[in-house]
Amino acid sequence: MLQGRTWVFPNTPYISASAAVGGPFEAQGPLADDFDILHGDLWLGEDSFEKAEKKLLEQACEKAIDKAGYKKDDMQFYLAGDLMNQVISSNFSARTLTIPYLGLFGACSTSMESLALGSLLVDGGYAKRVLVGTSSHNASVEKQFRYPTEYGSQKPPTAQWTVTGAGAAVVTSEKTGIKVTSATVGRVVDMGIQDPFNMGVAMAPAAVDTIEAHFRDLNITASAYDLILTGDLGKIGHRIAADLLKKHGLKVAEDKFGDCGLLIYREDQPVLAGASGCACAACVVFGHILNRMRRGELHKVLVVATGALLSPISYQQKESIPCIAHAVAFEAEGGGRSQ
Amino acid sequence: MLQGRTWVFPNTPYISASAAVGGPFEAQGPLADDFDILHGDLWLGEDSFEKAEKKLLEQACEKAIDKAGYKKDDMQFYLAGDLMNQVISSNFSARTLTIPYLGLFGACSTSMESLALGSLLVDGGYAKRVLVGTSSHNASVEKQFRYPTEYGSQKPPTAQWTVTGAGAAVVTSEKTGIKVTSATVGRVVDMGIQDPFNMGVAMAPAAVDTIEAHFRDLNITASAYDLILTGDLGKIGHRIAADLLKKHGLKVAEDKFGDCGLLIYREDQPVLAGASGCACAACVVFGHILNRMRRGELHKVLVVATGALLSPISYQQKESIPCIAHAVAFEAEGGGRSQ
């Protein structure tokens, strides 16, 4: 069902299970216990960071399928995307999984883009069991978008730290403790920011645009949610988003407005303005947040995953940064059979 | 409705209008009359090939919307992808169009991936009017995947020529002459081919896998279609696909089995094994084929767009080429109000 640009899911797709996989830096963070698998090194026994990233995504997918009590052949569709050129982490994981595959690109908004579409497939009767996932790897992303980490180039305090990890979820029509109730598709918002070391600022207006559309489409206010969580705005972007919400007359209580990029690392980890990367929202939501919902600590949550849709080429050609945010609303029904 | 991995669309999404835009090389081809806009130079007045590609896509989208008698604000969602790193042609066109946007990646299968999902949104009542599109540009793709064309590097006869162009379609719930009846989602198939100058061979098994699934899921044979058209297998891949179909016991008459990569250029244009690129299937189908359906020359057509999901990095790391094919079935109802 469509309201504005929000899909409402009356047939309630459910999160059957979800999984999060992280690297050594994530293992030192405050959410370590919410990861299903944590790796001690960045290579995962592979000979390239790209292959390591693919492995992270495969492990998250396999773990989510396993926790849901399924086999990979039970999955009817696999929706995934990532930050690598030509989304190779997703493509190659789809080769391993051999599930009918739809490749996506939403940069760091991919976790919620894939979940929105996966939930729609289940809601509309176009699938019974869908696997969604995304990944990022600090070293593969740094190498591709900036410099190889070995160069040791310095960054400004507005820069964010790309999460090494992957998150995946199995969406089904079978009742579990956590349902997906609606999803709002983002529009590209570009306020003219050109600095790729200041993504939070670039993405904040896109997050606010989607939150505003979500409220308007469903005729609700922030009070409908226990928590509204943006994807990876970081310290600076989060503050700007909060200011913009206020400016637009949308009252969101400070303690109910969070950002995945501020949750995954400790204050004293050297991540500058916070975390980012496709795995940021994916790991925090598919791990920590859904676990909190399973424990009954959160009842209704809106996740607004943000993505900066630039490329090194578009930046070099002096283009500004087009940004997007896709939102998905979760609701815990109690019972907690979601794994 | 789901059968196997095929979505059947009982509420029949319709092609309200479609458009194709091409470059100078496409203007010399046999399908020139089927393009809505043809450009005399590769730059389109822009200062980079990437910006020229974005412009091709924007023009195809705007033309399709215009032919359908709509304004861009009437479009509820825009689904697009391309071959550029981080699909920047699509992202930046979405910025221009300001339509709620879902970025996709399916390499040269994107035309049918976007149309499959767009049709599903309309069929399921999740949208009334959806815009889908994709693009490629010979020079931007050569530069990114191989060498800048100015280097003049030689290629083997198995190589294919990337189409400079873009195709777009408006899918709506309003009855027109052409409906989308079903779509089959591809699986990644990788037969171990590692040569990026021999994509047709790599992609042929993926096309056959999807055609086979489509027939099985709908319990039909090739006789259900006037034409089965693969995306961009080229001369060598097309022959292999025909052989494989025979080997799998699927009888497809030779004159009913075609390939977009063999249609868009003249025999004497120097394109080696044929055409490729996201725009290949998009221009041929959204231009030529739909025009033939509008004129009553074709009644039922299955388009199987093929994509090679590699990246320069995956190739350099000695990975083989994972391939996919997404199929969409079109049916002409007569009347021909589809523009």
Image (cartoon, coloured by chain):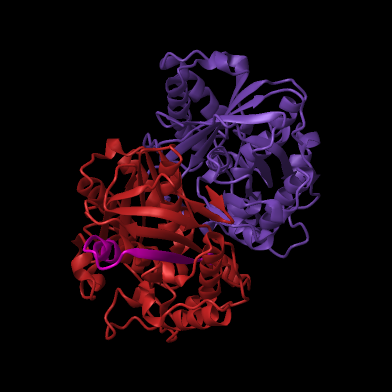
Chain colours: A purple, B red
Q: Nearer the viewer, residue A145 or B242?
A: B242
x, y percent for residue A265: 70, 34
Reply above or below: A335 against B328: above
Reply above or below: B261 against A333: below
Reply above or below: A15 against A99: above
Quarter of image, res B206:
bottom right
Please tell me which residue is depicted at 59% across the width and 33% down the height of the picture. Answer: A273
The reply, left or right, for residue B67 in relation to residue A126 is: left
Is residue B310 on the magenta stretch?
yes
Q: Residues in magenta?
A: B287-311
The reply, left or right, for residue B217 in relation to residue B225 is: right
Is residue A147 on the magenta stretch?
no
Q: Nearer the viewer, residue B221 or B186?
A: B221
Confirm whether residue A322 shows in the render. Answer: no
x, y percent for residue B294: 24, 60
The reply, left or right, for residue B284 in relation to residue A253 is: left
Confirm whether residue A24 shows in the render. Answer: yes
Please tell me which residue is depicted at 63% across the width and 32% down the height of the picture. Answer: A260
